[in-house]
Amino acid sequence: MSPPRCVLELYVSDASDVSRQAIADLEALCAASRGREWDVSVIDVLEDPKRAERARIVATPTLLRVSPGPERRVVGDLADRERTLLALDLPADGGEA
């Protein structure tokens, strides 16, 4: 049985170096995680402040796991894939959480 589709939202601030790095780190994480389907949205808090407010974003970058529930979030550096997956409560091998 395949794991449920994982819905992620990455909140960034403008086209800063930190934001670009967070996007690249998330792309690498998704590419390296075999056996899992991803639905990823990148939201610029400056372009969509209401959405960021509804999601209670207080710092960027913030990665939010929307589904499968319950919601989990990681604030800051996403470079350490294993640590990021652990914080999101997702197994590194794409298996059931």
Image (tube, grey):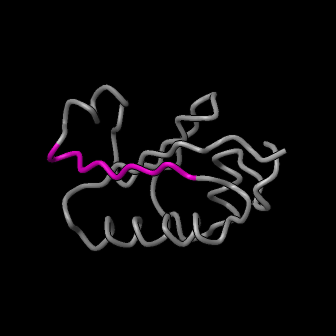
Residue 5 vertical placement versus 86 (above, below)? above
Residue at 38% x, 72% y: name it: 21
Residue at 54% x, 72% y: name it: 28
> Residue 79 placed where, x, y %?
54, 71
The reply, left or right, for residue 41 in relation to residue 71 is left
Q: Quadrant of the C terminus?
A: top right
In front of the other: 16 or 37: 37
Residue 14 vertical placement versus 52 (above, below)? below
Q: Quadrant of the N terminus?
A: top right
Q: For the magenta stretch, what is the residue range?
A: 38-47
Magenta stretch encompasses residue 91: no
Q: Give the quadrant of residue 89.
A: top right
> Residue 83 placed where, x, y %?
67, 61
> Residue 72 placed where, x, y %?
58, 37
Residue at 20% x, 66% y: name it: 15
The reply, left or right, for residue 93 in relation to residue 21 is right
Q: Give the quadrant of residue 51.
A: top left
Q: Residue furthest left?
A: 47
Magenta stretch encompasses residue 42: yes
